[in-house]
Amino acid sequence: MGIASINPATGETIKTFNALTDAELEAKLAQAEATYQTYRKTSFEQRTAWMHAAAQVLEDNKLAYGRIMTLEMGKPLKAAVTEVEKSAWVCRFYADHAAEFLADAPGQTDASQSFVRYQPMGAILAVMPWNFPFWQVFRFAAPALMAGNVGLLKHASNVPQSALAIEEVFSKAGFPAGAFQTLLIGASKVADLVADDRIKAATLTGSEPAGASLASACGQHIKKTVLELGGSDPFIVMPSADLEDAIATAANARMINSGQSCIAAKRFIVAESIAEQFEQGLKAKFEALTIGDPLDEGVEVGPLATASIRDELTAQVKACAEQGATVLTGGDVPALMAKLPERLQPGHYFPPTILSQIPPGTLADQEEFFGPVALVFRVPDLDAAIRVANSTPLGLGASAWTNDPEERERLVNEVEAGAVFINGMVKSDPRLPFGGTKHSGYGRELGSQGIQEFVNIKTVWIK
Ligand code: NAP
């Protein structure tokens, strides 16, 4: 795929870009290395000032940056602006806490003095996805830069303007040239890049195949990786839950980013006794959603980011229906398109869809559905709920709804996921670590744990 901004709401090509030549890429790597040699010696006070300035640049330009995202990947403008604000939050969070998270940590031993010192590693490569074009990058960049590393971004090929805008944020904030650079390159260049001595570690947020490919290239060169991969998060509802709240949250949790979020609730695992009420409630919420051009005020569900995402989702829904699942609402792309205006016809829209009565052994047990499709499973009790929740290869987040303290404790202990939220939807928060287990990846972003991923944890022992 070429590097281009194509509006997924209308199919219009906004701008195309040439990938960097080998010479241009070499110049950027050389600059990253040169900058690192001085940048790593800057004080926390200096980096804090730059990072607060970056937050300010984001806040001052949130509408313009939000529009770039909406036009490139189709999220409703209001959500895009909120994403810019959240990116500013993570900058301020690490600006204020990095020195504390990376302070020397004493340990009592047989030495007169022994402690741990956290030191930067060098240039870190971040391979990022298009679904949260700003947030995903800033949650990597804010801690990495505060730790004294420099960042190199290989963003998804469909969000080049977002990628360049992010480079601009750090430059306007006063960071030295080379502290954060965007590399407009295709995925095929990543393995060679990782082999370069000047890249010290890498992180990837995206699909399992991409994560496996990066990790294997890094493995060859003994370089650390953090992987944030897909999710098929369960949303468990037990009879003691506040059902109205659970239904309203379920609709939001599935529809966030038009369904294209790794931590969107995807599999709704509901106690049989309340399942009918839950399904009807969710159906009403889905059918009330406003679908259209994501730049228009009031639109809650925009297009999917690319035609291939819509094609894959269409095939997944069709396969499940053919294997016996009931389509409770949605599923019919032509019917949705017939209701949308002429100028949106080239867009990649998909209707909010609910599949229920899904027999065992369909794709719904194994694959991530990356779009506005809720999969509902009815279960007799908590044992079955936990069994179904853990039955996929993925383990990113989980949301569980119950007011029974014993059930709550079992869910916290037994659900295989990087995060469990009780009576709330899964969300990322700079103050808490974020990441997955199983095929959802390893390592953590955010919190104190996130900033300690890309540092040399040096043990110091003085007799
Ligand atoms: P993707 O195809 O894996 O793309 C993600 C990034 O990886 C892009 O920059 C892409 O570049 C690059 N890439 C693709 N193949 C690669 C390879 N073989 N080697 C190196 N880099 C490669 O992912 P996507 O489909 O755009 O994103 C959706 C997936 O991301 C979903 O599974 C979602 O759940 C997951 N995700 C996870 C998190 C999390 O925090 N765990 C957050 C958001 C999304 P090109 O664009 O140039 O191909």
Image: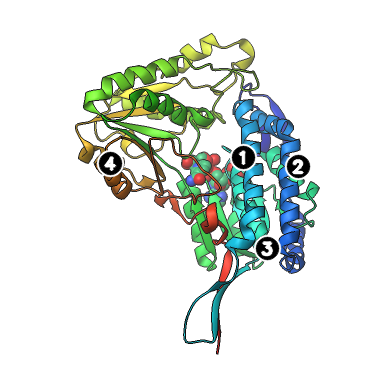
Q: CA separation, marks 4 and 2? A: 45 Å
Q: CA separation, marks 1 and 4? A: 33 Å
| Quadrant position of residue 144 | bottom right
Tag of residue 57: 2
- Mark 2 neighbour class, 10 Å CA radius: few under 14, some 14 to 19, many 20 or more: some
Amino acid tagged 2:
Val
Taking the spot 62% from the left edge, 56% from the top edge, the residue there is 97
Q: Is label 3's Cβ within 8 Å of ligand 1?
A: no
Tag of residue 405: 4
Q: CA separation, marks 4 and 3? A: 44 Å
Whole-percent x, y for residue 360 in the image: 24, 34
What secondary structure is found at the residue carrying circle 2? helix
- Mark 4 neighbour class, 10 Å CA radius: few under 14, some 14 to 19, many 20 or more: few
Q: Is label 2's Cβ within 8 Å of ligand 1?
A: no
Mark 3 sits on what residue? 148
Q: Earlier in the sequence, mark 1 or mark 2?
A: 2
